[in-house]
Amino acid sequence: MANYREAPLASRPKTLDPAEYFNLSLDKRRSVEEKATLRAQLKRQYQMQLNNPLRKELIEDPALTRWVYARTNPFNNFRPTKKTSLLGGLFGVLPLFVLYFVLKTDRDKKEKEIQAGTYKRKFNLSS
Amino acid sequence: MLKILIPTFMLFPTIWLVPGKWLWTATTAHSLVVASASLSWFKWCSETGWVAPNLYLALDPLSFPLAVLACWLVPLMIIASQNHVAHEPLTRQRTYISLLVSLQVFLILAFSAMDILTFYVMFEATLIPTLIIITRWGSQTERLSAGTYFMFYTLLGSLPLLVALLYLLNDTGTLSMHTLQYIQMTNPDTLGTMLWWVACLLAFLVKMPLYGVHLWLPKAHVEAPVAGSMVLAAVLLKLGGYGMMRMMVVLGPLTKEMAYPFIILALWGIIMTGSICLRQTDLKSLIAYSSVSHMGLVASGILIQTPWGFTGAIILMVAHGLASSALFCLANTSYERTHSRTMLLTRGLQMILPLMAAWWFLANLANLALPPLPNLMGELMIIVSVFNWSSWTILLTGLGTLITASYSLHLFLTTQRGPTPQHFISMDPSHTREHLLMALHLIPLLLLVLKPELMWGWCF
């Protein structure tokens, strides 16, 4: 029977409190002890890296790596839903057609004025 | 021309025969001598219209600014790569510098090519050293997919170009730029001619890159080592713009109707990629997307085929080459110290490296097109000529300028100002080499403020 004391940076899981200990089934006890072992090993690894006087680089944080990867590769988690299709169409497809329509109309109007001879040209030496 | 080309070819024996401890000094000095000799190309004889002509190669005011930029960049690339390649075996270091020099050779030949097929061959040839640099010397595992995207996007665009050029050769009997200015397009209304028009431009639009086909650029820039990023941003993108300007001569009256989709993609791309910049977490990715944004402006300037559009395009290409390359070098100084490109982790550097903060400030001001730098002059010329083309575009280009200013400031404030993270244990101070590198980038940019005629092109 292990006596898990509280450590300064590691709180003791409630289930390993000696007062509660005997109310647990053996399986539950074993699983909570395994998880506590793993946590302690991870903390030890981090502390070894943190206090290593010869370390010069960043301690690798897997959560940060995952976050950076997720931010740079959004397409892996992309699924065409109603909202994403609407946004994609509104910002990616519709402006192209609207711009084509606007610019073509404007340019054709200018062309008609030039053909008719009514286009007022301001003097510029070079354009 | 030969007085630049032969010393450039002689860089290969220099690289391979120099003893190990003199390698970097000797190659930097040799390439700096070649770069200063290339400044002789600025003397433009306006009577003939071409500088340094011989039977196969010549430069004109469109191409010699870009060729001088290509020559100038090689010593800068060698200086920038010195740190991260220094730990490798000697043969591999020599190989690396040989790849950079072979890029210079291909680029000089591409910009001075008088025959469009020569230009095409050199355009394709620059892909190979760049691919080797990205996939062999990049630092993440994603470099393989970056190399794949880079190769296949560019090849997808350039295979139709080969077919189009061979068809043109068959039709007109020559592909020399001297004679191609005088041909007429025979039947501009058929579907075949329209497809030929698209095939001629697609390779250059992919290379520029245009907004819809720009996906290869952020990947390639992020995964490449610093010399690869520098040469990609500064010169290889400009190959696309230069190719477009040369091809416009033969594309005749069809461009007035067919260019609309591409102008619209370019203009809308300025805003979209600028907005993406504001959301980036990776430093090099932000600079890569800002390259796409500036090149969108260049593409729209070229496609409207006015004198000011062309002039603005070439000024912006040269100025953007220097400014973007400077930003990549700065990002590399940060990366070498913290081994991380995440902007959240490399913040508040002004407290630690104040002199580098001064260079960051100047490079970001160049990127956001501060007057009187040529970035602004190029942008203004393009914006004005596009406004003359159609008044509605001022909404897009004006919003694009605003977004450019905001993401440049965001870049500067995030990396320099604010709280310094607590996890930095040991940071090298700024090396003199890095200060030299930044000075050599930004001093030409400041000098070009005083004499912009050097890069105006022949439309003025």
Image: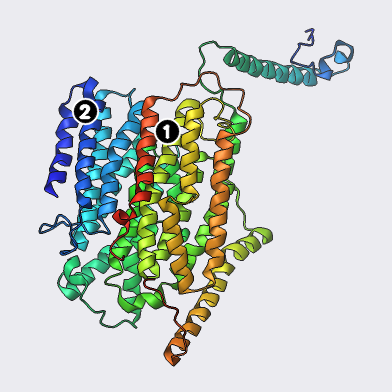
In depth, the one of B114 and B94 nearer the eye is B114
Q: Vertically, is B183 above or below B38?
A: below
Total numbered badges shown on the rendered structure: 2
Percent from the top left, x then y, of residue A87? 64, 61
Inspect the image, locate mark 1, and give the three-letter code of the amino acid beneath it. Ser
Q: Amino acid at mark 2?
A: Ala
Q: Is residue A35 left or right of residue B131?
A: right
* Residue B323: quarter of image: top left
Q: Is residue B109 above or below residue B334?
A: below
Above or below, B18 relative to A41: below
Using the image, name the chain to which the residue with label 1 belongs. Answer: B
Sequence-wise, which precedes: disc 2 or disc 1?
2
Quadrant of the image occupied by residue B123: bottom left
Determine if marks 2 and 1 fall on one subunit.
yes
Asked if residue B349 lies left or right of residue B244, the reply is: right
Residue at position x 26%, y 79% from top?
Answer: B185
Instruction: Name the side, left or right, on which A1 lies relative to B455.
Output: right
In this view of the protein, which residue sits in the foreground, B276 or B437? B437
* Residue B139's disc number: 1
**x, y (%) of residue A120?**
47, 84
Q: Which residue is mark 2?
A: B26
SS label for mark 1:
loop
Q: Which label lies toward us, 2 or 1?
A: 2
Q: Residue at x 21, y 67 (%)?
A: B166
Residue depicted at 47% across the width and 26% down the height: B337
